């Protein structure tokens, strides 16, 4: 008699966006992939995220081609804070105020130490979302949902593509660069469009 194979319902690798515009959608879903096992993720929460992201039009009035607004992500965070326990996915989201958006923010550091994550709004040719999953003294470790050739950052002195951590991160970026207020890749967007969202299991 053949023994049945038991499959563990575990976490799944973090994912890449499939259009030029769904970085916000993909990054929020990646936060769930990082924090929860596949068997724990509510399909209702997945559907809700898909429904309320990609809410912006571009300058030509084309729907969804403006990506996901800060308002949509903040709305979803409030909804998750009110409903995630009822959906058996207990988590808490905190939106940092604009003036507190820094890679050196203490609440952000404490959240990452507790194995939480942070959604960062950064530059990458345009406004872009990525997921912060780890910090050390000098570097931030991000999952960038925009797929690039493996050698894309070979000549960059502050960013490296990481090939072997699909469940955790794919970019290693100097922390001091993230806060330098330029428009280089992975620098935090400054001013009224800045955004950092902290998410952790409770």
Image (cartoon, helix red, strand yellow):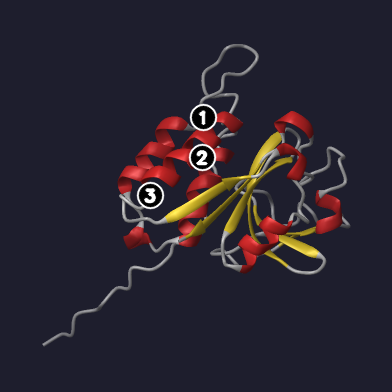
Residue 22 is tagged as none
Could you tell me if residue 161 is visible in this image?
Answer: yes
Q: Quarter holding the C terminus? A: bottom left
| Location of residue 49 in the rendering, given as x and y in whole percent from the top left corner | 43, 39
Q: CA distance from mark 2 to mark 3?
A: 17 Å
Contact check, label 2 and label 3, Cβ < 8 Å: no
Give SS at disc 3.
loop
Query: Is 201 positioned to the left or the right of 108 in the image?
Result: left
Neighbour tally class for label 2: few under 14, some 14-19, many 20 plus, Cα within 10 Å: many
Q: Earlier in the sequence, mark 2 or mark 1?
A: 2
Q: Which residue sits at x=56%, y=61%?
A: 116
- Label at residue 84: 3
Q: Is residue 16 visible?
A: no
Q: Are marks 2 and 1 in contact (CB under 8 Å)?
A: yes
Q: Is residue 134 above or below residue 180?
A: below
- Characterize the local packing of mark 3: few (<14), some (14-19) or many (20 or more) Cα atoms within 10 angstroms: some
Q: Is residue 31 above or below residue 134?
A: above
The mark closer to the camera, 2 or 3, is 3
What is the x, y in percent for residue 201? 47, 60
Left or right relative to 124: residue 68: left
Residue depicted at 82% across the width and 59% down the height = 174
Residue at the bottom extreme of this rendering: 1
Q: Which residue is mark 1?
A: 54
Answer with the quarter of the image where residue 80 lies.
top left
Q: Looking at the image, which residue sits at the far left?
A: 1
Residue on which the image places disc 2: 25
């Amino acid at each position: 008699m053949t023994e049945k194979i038991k499959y563990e319902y575990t976490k799944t690798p973090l994912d890449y966006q499939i259009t030029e515009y769904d970085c916000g959608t993909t990054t929020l879903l990646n936060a769930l992939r990082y924090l929860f096992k596949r068997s724990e993720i509510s399909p209702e929460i997945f559907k809700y995220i898909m429904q309320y992201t990609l809410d912006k039009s571009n300058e030509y009035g084309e729907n969804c081609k403006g990506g996901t607004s800060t308002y949509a992500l903040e709305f979803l965070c409030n909804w998750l804070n009110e409903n995630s326990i009822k959906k058996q996915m207990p988590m808490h989201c905190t939106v940092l105020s604009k003036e507190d958006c820094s890679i050196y923010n203490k609440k952000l550091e404490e959240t990452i130490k507790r194995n939480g994550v942070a959604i960062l709004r950064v530059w990458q040719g345009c406004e872009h979302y990525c997921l912060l999953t780890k910090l050390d003294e000098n570097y931030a470790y991000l999952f960038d949902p925009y797929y690039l050739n493996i050698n894309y950052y070979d000549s960059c002195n502050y960013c490296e593509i990481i090939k072997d951590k699909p469940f955790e991160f794919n970019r290693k970026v100097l922390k001091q660069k993230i806060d330098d207020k330029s428009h280089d890749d992975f620098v935090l967007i400054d001013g009224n469009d800045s955004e950092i969202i902290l998410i952790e299991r409770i």
